[in-house]
Amino acid sequence: MKLPVLHNFNAIKGEVISLSIGYNNVVASESLFACVRKYSPDEEYKAKFDIDVSTDELENDEASKITLSLDTNALAVGKYQWDLFIWNGDHPIKCLVKGQITIVEGVSNRGK
């Protein structure tokens, strides 16, 4: 599989989005960082994903399973960039996944 893998999200504001990724190496959650920026070159990120790593219920050649989750309440309606990097200390090592997040306003979620 060629890295980084492309994965885009479409969500209604207020939803929690999540993604489970099988990875063929053992990795600690402390070595991973995934954040959301409005534009790739922005210095400040708008939100960061919660990251959990497990070695339970693995498939085929997986050595670990990475689960990302993000509450979209922190984001305004619009388009964003995101990615997941492996870090070593204060240096990014490898981008595993990247993509866009599109947040739209809900219709029926604002009450009856």
Image (tube, rainbow, N blue to C red):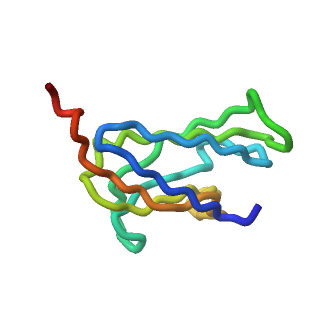
Tell me what residue is drawn at x 14 percent, y 25 percent. 112
Pinpoint residue 81: horizontal percent, then vertical percent. Answer: 43, 63
In the rendered image, which quarter contains the N terminus?
bottom right
| Horizontal arrangement in the rendering, residue 22 relative to residue 41 (left or right) | right
| Horizontal arrangement in the rendering, residue 17 relative to residue 5 (left or right) | left
Q: Nearer the viewer, residue 14 or 84?
A: 14
Pinpoint residue 38: horizontal percent, then vertical percent. Answer: 34, 64
The relative height of residue 50 versus residue 41 in the rendered view (above or below) is above
Occupied quadrant, residue 93:
bottom right
Residue farthest to the bottom? 41
Count all numbered tags in the image, as a single digit: 0
Pinpoint residue 54: horizontal percent, then vertical percent. Answer: 68, 32
| Horizontal arrangement in the rendering, residue 53 relative to residue 8 (left or right) | right
Tell me what residue is drawn at x 59 percent, y 50 percent. 32
Residue farthest to the left? 112
Tell me what residue is drawn at x 37 percent, y 61 percent. 80
The relative height of residue 28 versus residue 84 in the rendered view (above or below) is above
| Horizontal arrangement in the rendering, residue 75 relative to residue 55 (left or right) | left
Pinpoint residue 60: horizontal percent, then vertical percent. Answer: 85, 40
Tell me what residue is drawn at x 42 percent, y 42 percent. 70
Q: Nearer the viewer, residue 35 or 28?
A: 35
Residue farthest to the right? 61
